[in-house]
Amino acid sequence: MIPSSLTVILATLALGVVALTAFILAWWCGHFRDLDAQARVIFDSRELRFVRPWETSAQRLEREVTYGAPLPGERGEWGGAT
Amino acid sequence: MSRVWLLLVGAFAALSFAIVLLVLVPRALLMRVEASPGLMPYTTSELQGREVYIANGCVYCHSQQVRDPAFTSDVERGWGSRATVPGDYVYDRPHLLGTSRTGPDLINVGQRLPDRNWQLIHLYDPRALNAWSIMPGFPFLFTEKAPNAVRPGDVVVVIPGPRAPRGRVVVAKPEAVALTDYLLSLKRNAPVPTSATARERTAGPLAGGMSQHDGTARPAP
Amino acid sequence: MTHSQLAGEAEITSATTGAHEHGPTDLEIRLHADASSRLPVLVCYGAAMVWLVVGSLFGELASLKLHWPDLLSRDAWLTFGRIRTAHLNTVNYGWGSLAMIGTSLWLMPRLVHAELRRARLAALGAVLWNVGLVLGVGGILGGVSDGMEWLEMNRWFADPWLVVGGGMIGLALFSTVAARKAEHLYVSVWYIMSAFLWFPMLFLLGNWPSWSGVESGAVNWLFAHNVLGFWLTAVSVGVAYYFIPKVLGRPIYSYQLSILGFWSFAFFYALNGMHHLVGGPLPTWMITTSITASVLMFIPVVATAINLHMTVVGRFGSLRYSPTLRFVVLGAMGYTAVSLQGSFTALREVNRVTHFTHWTIAHSHVGVYGFVTFIMFGAMYYVLPRLVGHEWPSASLIRWHFGLVLAGIAIYVVALTWAGVAQGLALLDPKLPFQISVERTHWGLVGRSLGGLLMTTGHVVFAWHYWLMLRGRQPARARPPFHEARPILYTEAATEAAAAYRKESAVGAARSER
């Protein structure tokens, strides 16, 4: 019936191929490399080091190891509640 | 290629795909749909009444579609003798299919409740007829006149029971009359040509949806 | 610092490489981003707050009328069919859209590390949008409606204002992206940019005057469902993807999952619309396509849920400290809940019971309120201090707001879902007169009004607090306002730098319209 009609098949192919091409182009141009850096673009250099009052000591240690020496929470940036 | 452009092209393609599949292709197919047998275009008064229906948001409590009896009990409940098909709606601009049955389905109300007076009373004050009803009244579609102010040609509505306004006569405004004309025009029970083959009928619920002519779709021109 | 210095060529690389020797520092970039968007964001948020309160009042009145039908029923402009429609349009195109537009205008400069371009044009656009909305809703109350649900505002004297205003806002947003300095496009940028592309396409399609018959039904629900998905959901998910990692100080759990989540979302969501018409007079294949797409939505929804959950896991204690996280995390859970509920509801066997009942309304409020509105509340709690330069004056008002709306939506959803199922089961049984379906919903509808009352009260509390915030009342205490918590605000050094920047931009404003 309809799903077997030529029009639908061609329309699906046309748009699907466009999407697939876009994806392949993106891959080829390297947009999928270095995804970890993409995930970190929202942070600035200090805020990953702020002490956060809800974290356990294991979590704080992990933070120190990954991002560097802890910074005391600045007034207004999540810290200083202790 | 810049990732912004790639993103926009991809997003555009995703939505366009849906529009083609769910709007443009059906449009090409449904443009062939003809009115169901016996269905006439709305008269001027009925169209005015339809505008009153839209202006007051009737669609938010009342649907206008009868679903396949193999699927559910709309037909058994008496809301229609058959499922409604696209040909029933060709003169509807826009559709008023509705998504809510706070009140009953109305697509065949003209057949089910053909008494004009009942309709007028019900519009003025639903609880004058059904104490359990939560439908709002539409007193602003009526005028309440002193008895000696009633003129010949006025559509007088006699409200039964204790909820009638005392010492006043309820007269329907043209909007109420038009709305009633529209409601009484809602009849979609004429049988549609069932040239749908047995195979289609047993293909499952709603398979008859396209059976206006021969049930098979021709590719869009 | 002048504009030209700020527009300097320095690229911002990954945070772990630390500050740079030349070009603006991270803090300055943030400050300038926030300062550049201040005017249009405040216009959007202010208007959004007004619509939130007005829309809630319309909603509460509509709810009361369903179990007290003679309430205020004498006047045409107060009839249920107009009040309900006014509620839908004010909360969606007023509160929801403007809160999202404001948040997007604030967020985009932050994400791309460039100042908001054409900020005053965006502010003007927001004003025009509101003009259109006033005309549109006024028209609805006056009985002027285009007839299709979600598209009622008059297409000639109301909608064009939204098109022009929205276009101005879109222009500002896209110019800002074009001027970006950040090397990477964070996932929130994809969601927001796509939403600002999709919404105008949908708005024009839906409002096009030529549709009739069952085709208009298909267009109606393609529009309405995609406004939910490609506008309300897309921006809200993008906002959640920013605030959850940001406040927690942890990058999103899996960037790969966000890519999968976004693209499957884009391709499956668009096809969902016909699930509002299951059983209706449309070709079966269209409805089946939508049901299939609705079930396939499991993929992006679960991907997003895993991503956000794994980012928060082990740190749920943060919800005690941060009002932003309280609302955004619950909102993200609301997204998962409403989407899984939606996939389930689209199945024909379930739809047989739930279609045409109050279940659908309960479901839509889990989404537009429990998900979108909650996320917008969380976003506003974060953004406002950065725009006005001081923290929220009262911890108590934040707690009241949160408690009231949470209790409100919980009661709302439970009461109305129960009413919907009772109604649906009664409707299915042809031996039961219609009257039974109405009577069985009564107490659920009363419960919904109670929930709505709590929500409306919560909104009034929030609006009052917003007003106090704008008036600049400095909190007169040394300790943070929360019980063991402190909301985010500027540091003293940052506040001075921001004030100096704002003064300087006022002087230099005429020069640089980019």
Image (tube, helix red, strand yellow):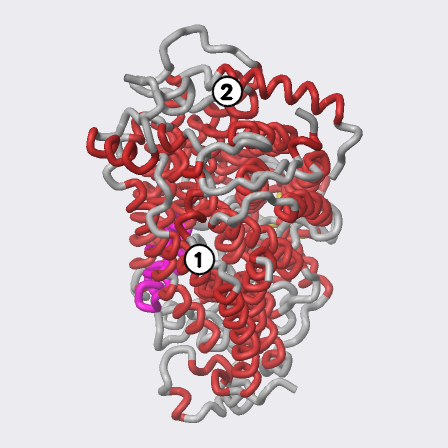
Locate residue C475 relative to residue B55 in the image: left or right: left
Tags 1 and 2 both on a single chain: no
Residue at mark 1: A33
Residue at mark 2: C464
Q: Residue at x 63, y 36 (%)?
A: C115
Quarter holding the N terminus of chain C?
A: top right
In which quarter of the view is residue C480 placed?
top left
The answer to which of B3 and B147 lies nearer the viewer is: B3
Q: Amino acid at mark 1?
A: Arg
Q: Is residue C359 magenta?
A: yes
Farthest-out residue, front: C21
The answer to which of B47 and C333 lies nearer the viewer is: C333
Compared with C305, C101 (above or below) is above
Residue B77 rendering spot, x and y as whole percentages: 37, 67
In which quarter of the view is residue B177 placed?
bottom right
Q: Is residue C302 visible?
A: yes
**Callout 1 crowding tier (Cα within 10 Å): few <14, some 14–19, many ≥20:** few
Q: Chain of mark 2?
A: C
Q: Is residue B160 visible?
A: no
Compared with B130, C284 (above or below) is below
Span colored in magenta: C338-363
In which quarter of the view is residue C323 placed?
top left
Locate residue C277 relative to residue A50 in the image: left or right: right
Q: Residue at x 29, y 34 (%)?
A: A63
The answer to which of C195 and C277 lies nearer the viewer is: C195
The answer to which of C382 and C465 lies nearer the viewer is: C382
Residue B215 rendering spot, x and y as whole percentages: 50, 88
